[in-house]
Amino acid sequence: MTERQKPHEQDAIARRSNFEAVEEDLTPQQVKLEAQRCLRCKNARCIQGCPVNINIPEFIQALKEDNVQKAGDIIRETSLLPSVCGRVCPQERQCEGKCVLGIKGQSIAIGALERYVGDKSSAKNSAIKPSGKKVAVVGSGCAGITAAADLRKAGHDVVVFEALHKLGGVLRYGIPPFRLPRKFLDREINTLKELGVVFKTNVIVGKSITLKQLKDDGFDAIFICSGAGLPKMLGVAGENLNGVYSANEFLTRVNLMQAHEKHTPTPLKIGNKVAVIGGGNVAMDAVRTAARVGAEEVYIIYRRTESELPARLEEIRHAKEEGVIFKLLHSPVEIIGEGGYVKGIKLEVMKLGEPDDSGRRKPVQTGEIVEMDVDTVIVALGTGPNPIIQKSAKAEGMDIETDRRGYIVVDVEDNKTSIPMIFAGGDVAPTGESNAINAMGAGKNAAKAINEMLKSA
Ligand code: SF4
Ligand code: SF4
């Protein structure tokens, strides 16, 4: 059988100093070869692996017939973000992870094919029959733009409120351009604008406007998908020193505010030796970004081994190729400072113990402490929900139920919150692994439930 086709990648040394895409699109010849590998399974397991259930065998069939636009039309019946998803979905755990060819060999490169189709085809303008209903979407990340598209297609007036000055949520401020070039994100957001979705930036729901005001303004339903932007820190001594960043702040300042550039009003001081704490995709994004903004030595500090790293295999491979050093089985116990600035980090050597609830072997302390010289520490241990919306809603008598960690509690079936007209999804109301495509799945789910509610109103 033909080998799985691989996109050409930018040379690792060259790309360490630029923000250009690491991977190119497959060539048309590669697309044809890859499409021909697909068995067009009747009971396509790949579709079950996709949280938005894209009709994968059919769009691949259109590629076999050299009809890229038809492939695009098939994908866009379900998702308006093929260029984004083809780049940022963890395909090996989703669609490709279920592909039958992956059982004994190499799964179809669904993500690379979808990305090609997204880039090379256009969205069609479909006629919209006005429903006379208004829906507010709070947040313009994956869940928000997906829900906005489905709600608009159902005829509702949709207004998306974004707290930042640019649209896209974590796709914009979190994911670096070398993984998701901005022209593709902009193009897919423009498709929504052409559909008639209204976007309002610099509006913090809970501060600039409250949920009650939205309700009083005549919105018939509200979908909260404001993400989880509150960073989790280490809780060790030295965390307040200059040179310690959360990955959230670091990535936002580089991706959104170009804080690393020479003539920026908001400069970012990054040292020569940077330690990133964590092993997920955000940690990989942060460490690879640190290398690109001038750090000479970049480290990942992770308390388990490589087999337990939660980041995508491809991101780990790319990081290694770019010279990232993985310091595994080490856990920070103190950040050492001098004159108010980071000078080093103390790490405890760990070993693996019994598996924990997640099935991964638990890191166990050994008592052995080592020190490393670093001048910047970036903490990438995840984020929690920002409580602004929930707090302001409560003050106005709209008590949205949250769990003990502050996440909004929703019904998994329909993303309903404890307040009938309010729905929530994505990282602010997680119902599965936190990633772009699961957030999109939540956006679709919520839009379907909102449509049903508004139809019966
Ligand atoms: Fe796979 Fe993501 Fe595309 Fe679904 S949206 S088919 S999970 S790449
Ligand atoms: Fe094609 Fe794999 Fe899906 Fe079968 S499971 S239709 S081979 S992509």
Image (cartoon, rainbow, N blue to C red):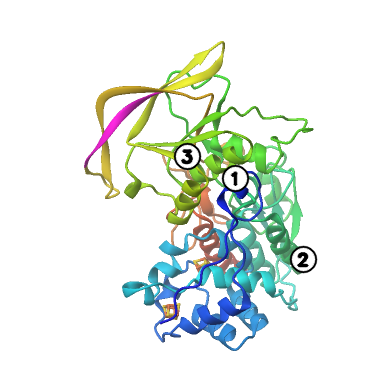
Q: Residue at x 55, y 61 (%)?
A: 440
- Span of residues in magenta: 346-353
Q: Residue at x 48, y 38 (%)?
A: 380
Q: Position of residue 300 (x, y in %)?
A: 45, 38
CA gap between label 1 and label 3 equals: 38 Å
Q: Position of residue 129 (x, y in %)?
A: 74, 76
Q: Amino acid at mark 3?
A: Gly
Q: Is residue 37 left or right of residue 133?
A: left
Secondary structure beneath label 3: loop
Label 2 CB sits under 8 Å from any ligand 1 atom: no
Along the polypeptide, which appears first: circle 1 or circle 2? 1
State the mark number for residue 16: 1
CA gap between label 1 and label 2 equals: 40 Å
Residue ID for mark 2: 196
Label the magenta part by its dominant secondary structure: strand
* Residue 54 seen by the camera: yes
Q: Is residue 333 above or below residue 294?
A: above
Residue 329 location, quadrant: top left
Along the polypeptide, which appears first: circle 3 or circle 2? 2
Q: Quadrant of the N terminus?
A: bottom left
Is residue 52 in the magenta section?
Answer: no
Residue ID for mark 3: 406
Dot 3: within a 10 Å radius of its alpha carbon, few (fewer than 14), some, or many (20 or more) residues? some
* Residue 52 seen by the camera: no
Along the polypeptide, which appears first: circle 1 or circle 3? 1
State the mark number for residue 407: none
Secondary structure beneath label 1: loop
